[in-house]
Amino acid sequence: MAQQADITTMRRAVELAARGLGATSPNPVVGCVITDASGHVVGEGFHQRAGGPHAEVHALREAGVLARGGTAYVTLEPCNHTGRTGPCAQALIEAGVSRVVYAVGDPNPQATGGADTLRAAGAEVEQGLLEAEAEAGNIAWLTSVRHGRPFVRWKYAATLDGRIAAADGTSRWITSAESRTDVHRLRAEADAVVVGSGTARADDPHLAVRGVEGAVQPLRVVVDTEATAVKPGARVLDDAAPTLIAIAEDAGTSPDGAESVRLPRAERGLSVPALLDALHARGVRSVLLEGGPTLAGAFVAAGAVDQVVGYLAPVLLGAGPNALADAGISTITEALRLDVTETVRVGPDLRITATLKGA
């Protein structure tokens, strides 16, 4: 059974890892804490950006000679390969660390094996401490490695009776300023923000991150099947963040200056799996789906939603579009059942986070 000191130190490593959210793709977020031989913290670090030093390297640099004979707490199994940086397992060995505790095994076949290398060098190695917490914080990268596609978080804002707009189409603002600020945090954690043609026409959204210091701007993606929704001068075409227009293979051309990708059609709109494959090939490991009910329905129907984040306002409308359109569910036995993982007050609103049961 883990000692309380081990749990506390690993939880600190999980907190450190979260600082890298939105900045490390296509790499994982990782946190590391080094304690000396007597158990005192002497070094901390997290993976700050792709291509930069890994968490273990930052922590070892801070610890210096005090790492010898100490323990390293890492949220992900130390890597065992040389990429843009050297193998972290070897760095820990050279620093003289005698014990390594890591939360999640590395599923990447190119990087796994660090634990075996450490054991072969005589280090004591333990796996699984706070595994669920560390996995939750790194779920986007883990999903991309395990399934070969980006992690998809569907975000919507609605009234308590599930409406995202009034009967006349007005929707600003259903939720509070606090909730809208919180959405920018979600954008900052994502590699790409995706909307559909309906949202592009109705709202002319900007989709860039505002108010989050140091944020790496996500790729703005508009699913514009017929290449008619994004007009010259649209806000997504400014230079605040990169933009990609997804259009059908047989559609017209996108606006001048806009990068586009042509994808096969599906029964409704574009093929969602093809879109996710195209984004994954561009290094996108996490998607924030902000589209309207039609695009959300297409993603749900394709089995491509990993997490749902709903902002519910204490408002009733009684009419107007629902948050989710046809998702291919025709009977109650086909309903997608969710596990609620978090419920938080955001200003006057309620933010509910859920995942598919059994996911």
Image (cartoon, rainbow, N blue to C red):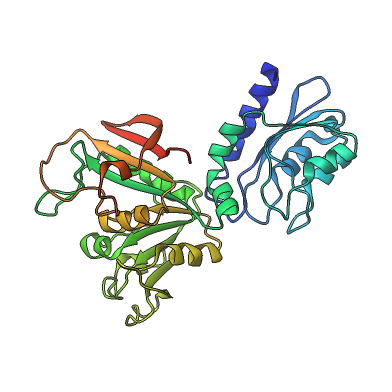
Residue located 26% across and 31% down the image:
348
Horizontal placement of 14 versus 124: left or right? left
Image coordinates of residue 22 in percent, x first then y, are: 52, 49
Residue located 75% across and 55% down the image:
85
- Of residue 288 and residue 40, the one placed in the foreground of this image is 288
Can see residue 191?
yes
Residue located 26% across and 71% down the image:
229
- Of residue 4 and residue 143, the one placed in the foreground of this image is 143
Horizontal placement of 115 versus 275: left or right? right
Horizontal placement of 137 versus 3: left or right? left
Would you identify the image quadrant in which residue 104 lies? top right
Image coordinates of residue 58 in percent, x first then y, are: 72, 42
Compared with 78, 248 (above or below) is below
Compared with 71, 323 (above or below) is below
Residue located 58% across and 47% down the image:
142
Can see residue 24?
no
Image coordinates of residue 308 in percent, x first then y, are: 38, 43
